[in-house]
Image: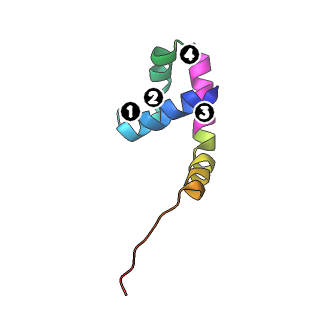
C-alpha cells in the first residue's frame, strides 16, 4: 500500500515543487491522510530512498553502442 505514496513522493521530488521536508501536506491533500500518517510515510520514504533507488538502478539495463 505504501508503494502508491512512495511513487507520489518520488514524483513530487522530481517535480521540485517543494523541499521534501515539506511533503507531508502534499500527501495529506492528495490522499486524505491525517498529519501524523503523512509525517510517518514521509519519514519512511526518506529513510528508504537510497535503498529503493539502488534497487531500481540494479534492475535497469543500459545498452551502449560502440563503433569499431
Label 2 neighbourhood size at 10 Å, few (<14), some (14-19), many (20+)? Answer: few
Q: Earlier in the sequence, mark 3 or mark 4?
A: 4
Cβ atoms under marks 2 and 1 closer than 8 Å: yes
Look at mark 3 in the image and give the residue it sits on.
43
Total numbered labels: 4
Q: Which residue is painted at 35% across and 83% down in the image?
A: 67
Q: Which residue is painted at 62% across and 41% down in the image?
A: 47
Look at mark 1 in the image and give the residue it sits on.
18
13, 39: nearer the viewer: 13
Query: How far separated are the C-alphas under marks 3 and 4?
Result: 12 Å
What is the magenta range? 35-45
Look at mark 2 in the image and give the residue it sits on.
22
Look at mark 4 in the image and give the residue it sits on.
35
Q: Earlier in the sequence, mark 2 or mark 3?
A: 2
Tell me which corner region of the image, top left, top right, bottom left or bottom right, holds residue 14.
top left
Q: Which residue is painted at 57% across and 21% down in the image?
A: 38
Assign a secondary structure to mark 1.
loop
The percent coordinates of residue 39 (x first, y second) are 58, 24
Label 1 neighbourhood size at 10 Å, few (<14), some (14-19), many (20+)? Answer: few
Amino acid at each position: 500500500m505504501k508503494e502508491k505514496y512512495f511513487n507520489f513522493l518520488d514524483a513530487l521530488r522530481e517535480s521540485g515543487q517543494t523541499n521534501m521536508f515539506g511533503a507531508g501536506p502534499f500527501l495529506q491533500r492528495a490522499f486524505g491522510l491525517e498529519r501524523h500518517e503523512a509525517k510517518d510515510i514521509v519519514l519512511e520514504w526518506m529513510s528508504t530512498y537510497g535503498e529503493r533507488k539502488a534497487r531500481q538502478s540494479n534492475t535497469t539495463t543500459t545498452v551502449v553502442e560502440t563503433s569499431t
